[in-house]
Amino acid sequence: MSRRVGYVVAAAILTGSLALANFMVSLRPEPARREPPSRVPFAITEPVAAAAGAIPVHGAGTVRPSAQIDVAAEISGRVVWVSPVFQTGGRVGRGQALFRLDDAGHRHRVERARAVVAVQEVELLKVEEEARIARDQYERFRRRQAADSPVADTGPLALWEPQLRAAQAAVDRDRTALAEAELELSRTVVHAPFAGVVRAESVDVGHFVTAGEPVGQLFAADAVEVVVPLSDADAALIPGLWDLRPGDADRRVTARIVADYGNASHAWAGYVDRVEAALDEQTRTLDVVVHVPQPFAGGVPVQRAGRPEADSVAGADQVRSPPLLVGKFVDVRIDGLAPGRYFQVRRPALRPGNEVWAVRDGALTIVPVRVLQRFDDSVYVTGALTADQPVVVGGIEIATEGMAVRTAAEVDH
């Protein structure tokens, strides 16, 4: 009897436990339902920038002198004086004396030549007087004899004509010798042929120089040049490049030259002067020569893209801008052709085959473009694009015309 009661109690406890468990399960909150993840690919886009004006043609090169000469004396001699400005970095004006040679011997030769000329001029006067007397005597004799019988023509020697020519030639010869002596004397002073900067010098007082021996280098200060190697594709963007002639100011293609100096950058205005007539055999590039007037006038401070602002220093506004130094490696921006309409996109937006993937109303459109110029992270193109139109720069690697894509703007919305 007691065993049956135990079974009943155990069954009651089991049944109650099951009922309580079902009751607790029924009170559990239902889990939130989630939408299945979208299978539409997500594309990273950036807007297209409409560009206007000239297409910038970017390059770089080293500044070189527009004119440079070796300084040398035309005669040999010992140096007795050197100008204080004739040293490395010195600025000289056109015609300014650089150094002088001992001229004592040349002065003596000039004085001797002048004395010889004076003597020969007196001899010429004597011969001229003798020739005049001879002509007068001949005329009187001819008049006296004309009535009786014809007078035979006298020879030129009797009229002193050869003697007169010889005396005149002697004077001309000695005057030429005097001019040569004076020229040699003038060459004892070496002058600067143009305004420039001394790049090198190796002469001092007491130094004996030989005619034609280089004792220094001088380059022009009124202008410098930058040789910019460009590919033929970039060179084709320069308007009228092959029509340019050196020094032709009527067909200038403007350019801007930027050089770093410390933590700052400075810019100078220039223009394309000419292009070399042959490709570089090693780099297969064209050398475009940019002319920069007044390089020592100082550049205009500019802020390069991607560089931090230079720290301000007390009195920095009073510091003069540096010159455009010869040998400096600089960046050059040339104003190229100005098409009616073109666009600027980031380099990742340009796909193989010169295509851009544009997004319109959640669908991808493949737009063929023509590449005009590449520079850093920017590409200048023409094609069926519109300003501010989103183009794919990342997120997807394969695309088909009309495929659906998601963008950050749609996700935020």
Image (cartoon, helix red, strand yellow):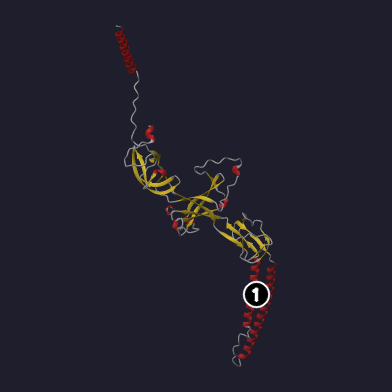
385 vs 186, left or right, is left
- The image shows residue 122, relative to residue 249, as above or below, that is below
Left or right of residue 260, residue 164 in this image: right
Q: From the image, which quarter does the N terminus lie in?
A: top left
The quadrant holding residue 50 is: top left
Badge 1 crowding class, 10 Å Cα cut-off, few under 14, some 14 to 19, many 20 or more, is many
- Residue located 38% across and 33% down the image: 411
Q: Residue furthest top?
A: 1
Q: Position of residue 353 (x, y in %)?
A: 36, 48
Please state which of residues 27 and 383 is positioned toward the viewer in this rendering: 27
Rendered position, 304 above or below 107: above
Q: How many marks?
A: 1
The reply to whether residue 64 is visible in this rendering is yes
Image location (x, y in percent) of residue 380: 41, 47
Mark 1 is on which residue type?
A: Asp
Identify residue for label 1.
174
Where residue 174 appears, as percent x and y from the top left, is 65, 74
Q: Which residue is found at the position 65% from the left and 86% from the top?
A: 137
